[in-house]
Amino acid sequence: MKWQTAKQRKPATLARKDQRGAALMMVLLIVAVMVVVAVGLIDGVRYSSQRLLNQRIMDQAYWYALGGERIAVFALEDIAGETVVNLGQDWARKDIVFPIDGGSIAGLISDEQACFNINSLYKQSADSSASAELSTAERVFTGLLTNLDISPQRAEFIIGRTQDWIDEDFSPEGIYGAEDLTYTAKDYPYLPPNNLIDSISELGLFAEFEDDEQARISPYLCALPEANTVLNINTVTTAQAPLVAAAVGNVLSVEAVQAVLERRPEQGWSDVASFVGELGLSAEEPLPTVFLQGLGVTSRYFKGLADVFYEQRQLHLYSRMVLKNGKAVVYAREYGEVF
């Protein structure tokens, strides 16, 4: 039998110690990897859970908003048979708030015929014989910009661009006309819709606004799904006096028209003639018929806002509605902030 000395046994002992150290390192590495994977899984589960919670809350807020929309529909249907629409009616209240579990719903309805319909600038055909004379809508728009201290040249430019933007053909009309070739040559090319404008924000794509022009003009504009609408003199505010003055051909100053609006009866004027009588025009110089045709005391188009605050989240739902055959029909919805 052959005996090993202590010196001969030492290398084997060191080898076993090295193996135990390597095994310990592998175990620690595996544990570290498992910890990282577990943390990742927990974060993923937590993120998915929070996302699903947010989605559930926003879905619930959306249904609450639709409930607010239905209330607006009922309020508008109450005036569907009225011959006069005014700010003294229930639909125009600005203090409507409904409590709900976990929050509240605030509602607001605005008249979309208390502004200048930009689609009224639409020209069905490029009739050269009539192009020299401005249409009533063009005259009102030019007068509005004049009251806002914007030059008639800029008004002519915006009118030309707007008409080419919404007409059906692909040929530029007039000295300011622009069609596909103009917009596809830009750094970020796009095409005009050749259809009625859906939102006044579209003007930023073709009007080439200068300085603060867009901010000054936008409060007086709206975009309705038809071209032939009237301005409701019963729902315009005194702040919209520049628009009303333009709508009557600027026969009176903005200040004089504002004074007339301040004297408006609580239930509004019963007809356009009553409003014209308040203007104090002489019998020798009556208001032209073309301007009378653009005024009215009733409205069909409205916009409702349902502002839902639920579980520390907020949702805005804008509903565009039209009164048709005694019913309020929602024809478009917009979410979030409207620019």
Image: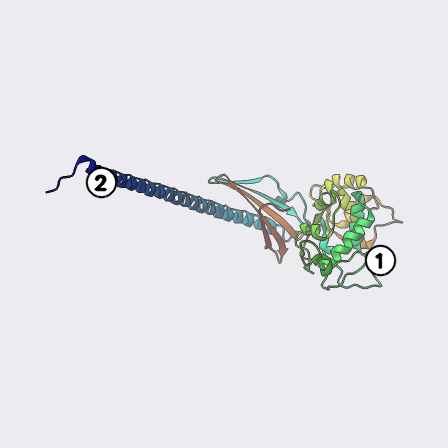
Q: Closer to the observer: label 2 or label 1? A: 2
Residue found farthest to the top: 6
The residue carrying pointer 1 sits among few (fewer than 14), some (14 to 19) or many (20 or more) residues within 10 Å by Cα, namely: few
Q: Quadrant of residue 210?
A: top right
Residue tagged by mark 2?
A: 12
Say which of 286 and 192 sits in front. 192
Say which of 136 and 248 sits in front. 136
Q: Residue at x 35, y 41 (%)?
A: 32
Mark 2 and mark 1 lie on one chain; the one further toward the N terminus is 2
The CA distance from mark 2 to mark 1 is 110 Å
The vertical placement of 17 against 76, above or below, is above
The vertical placement of 217 against 7, above or below, is below
Give how far across and how far down residue 40 sits, in percent: 40, 44
Residue tagged by mark 1?
A: 133
Name the residue type under label 1.
Glu
Residue 293 as seen in the image, left or right of residue 21: right
The N terminus, quarter of image: top left
State the SS at label 1. loop
Give how far across and how far down residue 317 sits, in percent: 57, 47
Q: Quadrant of residue 97?
A: top right
Give how far across and how far down residue 267 sits, in percent: 69, 43
Q: Residue at x 80, y 48 (%)?
A: 143
State the SS at label 2. helix
Give the colouring mode of the picture.
Answer: rainbow
Name the residue type under label 2.
Ala
Residue 267 as seen in the image, left or right of residue 3: right
Q: Does the image show residue 234?
A: no
In the picture, the disc for residue 189 is none
Give how far across and how far down residue 54 sits, in percent: 47, 44
Q: How many marks?
A: 2
